[in-house]
Amino acid sequence: MRTPGWISLAALLLTTTATTSTSFALPPNAAPTLRAGANHHTGDDGFLADLGRAPAPGEEKLRMHEHFIAVRARLAALPATRPDLEGKRHQLLAALDNYIAQGVTPDNDVLPWRTPVFIDDKGVICAVGFLIQQSAGRPLAEKVAAAHRYSFIEDIAKDMPEVRAWVAESGFTLDELGQIQPGYQGPEVLQFHPFDLAKHRKGEDESYPPPVEDGDYERDGMTGTIAKRLMEGPWELRNAAGIVLGSGTFHRGAGTWTSFYADGAKMAEGAFAHNRPSGSWKFFHGTGYLAAEGRFQAGQRTGGWKFYYDDAAHTPIAIGTFDRNGYVDGTWKHFDTRGKLLLTSSRDDIPSQWEQEKPLFWSAAYRLQLQPRDGITHRIHAGSISGDSHRLDELALADGRERVYLRYDDNALFDASGHALVPVDGTWRADDCKWSAARRRAARRGDIAQLHGLIYNGANETCAQGELVAPDRAARLTRLVGSLASVRAASPELLEQVALGDEAAAASLTDTLAANMTLDIEWPHVDGKFVALFETLPGYTRS
């Protein structure tokens, strides 16, 4: 039986809270008490205390190191949970020292938000996992990773008795272990930069490898030959296990390259020119079905691209363009699993209030326009201010009788007159929030960008308790809110599988798109393919 919209509103809000793929994001179902940054308890306090500034892009390794050093010092100054566990606590602190000295942490190659990763695909274990491994054995750590790869230690302990037992005998409190566990930055495709491996000039940027002379080339598993500063003859990339991940044949820097998944299935193939991807390219799902097609120019994705669901019919999931720098550009179309147009997305106006608050990071804003359904229109204005994501939804009846706005920052629902709409015993109460004339004007004319700027930071506003609405209006409001569930198209299967192992928390395609339109658009079902490709190509570095 379908749950009425006024009942399901709270659940919908909990599972669709806006997130961002920047390094400041939290998972979409994170509690509001958790902090953004390196750790969900302490944020980036260690980095700030030691270096006197916030972490900058590209400083993830330093960020993790500073976090571990700070939490290690803090925990060393505290006693064990029981006197008889002092020795065990000291042993685990020594193990943490070894982990810090290794300087290797897991990679978050899947989720588009900052999240713990207990053990990654390469077998790299997190800090808390390492403590479990050193004291209880690798099998328990791997059992945790199999069931709770992306979970916080608090949630892991709640679900696994053997982990609760380990915590009880560790000499640490669960909160202290939570202070150790980091969250790892999600994949960011624009961190990859193409460079001409033969022509790059020294001193341009230390993150780029130095240029090489003519002759044999060998670096990080990539082998080939350079003649007259151009790629020549066969080239190949092998991983540490000797598996071929990419190969191509070139003449004067031009040729064709093919990339492979670790199981040998074709991942992508396309043209090279002047030592860089240039020309037509195709991506493939592991099943062999076409995943995407478009063009590169001088190593950057550019122009029109099409992305497809993993099926034989080549059902489109997204169609749009990238600019010459590889950024999402113009208007994109997004489709459901049947190939029916679901919504369009485009860059939107940045509210003037956001422009005034960009000393740390710039502001950005985007608009999602869903296709009208059952007489209801749905628009979303999403963006970022100083690294924090914000979202405002507009739901309106096509006949103009009702228009409401859902502010995701605090899960507040308003009508166009500035009343907070509160579900009460199967109906709705309209509380007067005494909106300014400017807010009411923007709301009534549907200027979602302007209204978002006016109300984005109003979570602490005071509203006077009002009366219950008339039955006919209550029915309209319930219909509007209920449409949030009815228009939820399934997200790509990948996202359903990795949404923290919680089916109820798996984001819809609409929410996935909105959550990743913040500073730089990074849709995981689009950008994940490029990240995987760039890691198999010659001539790319990651900042």
Image (tube, rainbow, N blue to C red):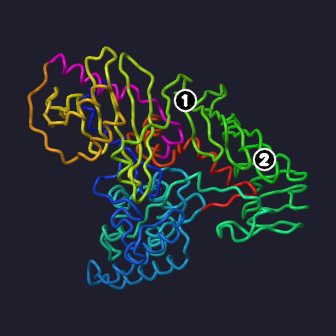
What residue is pinned by disc 2? Answer: 258
Comparing 152 with 136, the one in front is 152
Task: Check the image and report above or below for 456 versus 341.
Answer: below
Residue at 44% x, 33% y is: 368
Q: Was residue 510 drawn as part of the magenta stretch in this picture?
A: no
What residue is pinned by disc 1? Answer: 333
**How many numbered marks are there?**
2
The quadrant of the picture occupied by the N terminus is top left
Task: Check the image and report above or below for 494 versus 171.
Answer: above
- Residue type for callout 1: Lys
Q: Earlier in the sequence, mark 2 or mark 1?
A: 2
Task: Check the image and report above or below for 480 versus 308.
Answer: above
Looking at the magenta stretch, what is its main secondary structure? helix
What is the span of residues highlighted in magenta in the rendered image?
471-498
**Residue 539's image quarter?**
bottom right
Comparing 60 with 303, the one in front is 303
Q: Secondary structure at mark 2?
A: strand
**Residue 327's image quarter?**
top right
Residue at 29% x, 17% y is: 400
The spot of residue 463 in percent (x, y) is 13, 40
Comparing 474 with 490, the one in front is 474
The quadrant of the picture occupied by the C terminus is bottom right
Q: Is residue 484 left or right of residue 316?
A: left
Q: Is residue 69 left or right of residue 443?
A: right
The spot of residue 299 in percent (x, y) is 72, 50
Farthest residue to the top: give it: 399
The spot of residue 334 in percent (x, y) is 53, 30
Q: Which one is closest to the eye, mark 2 or mark 1?
A: 1
Q: Was residue 474 drawn as part of the magenta stretch in this picture?
A: yes
Q: Is residue 360 left or right of residue 304?
A: left
Task: Give the spatial CA distance, label 2 vs label 1.
Answer: 28 Å
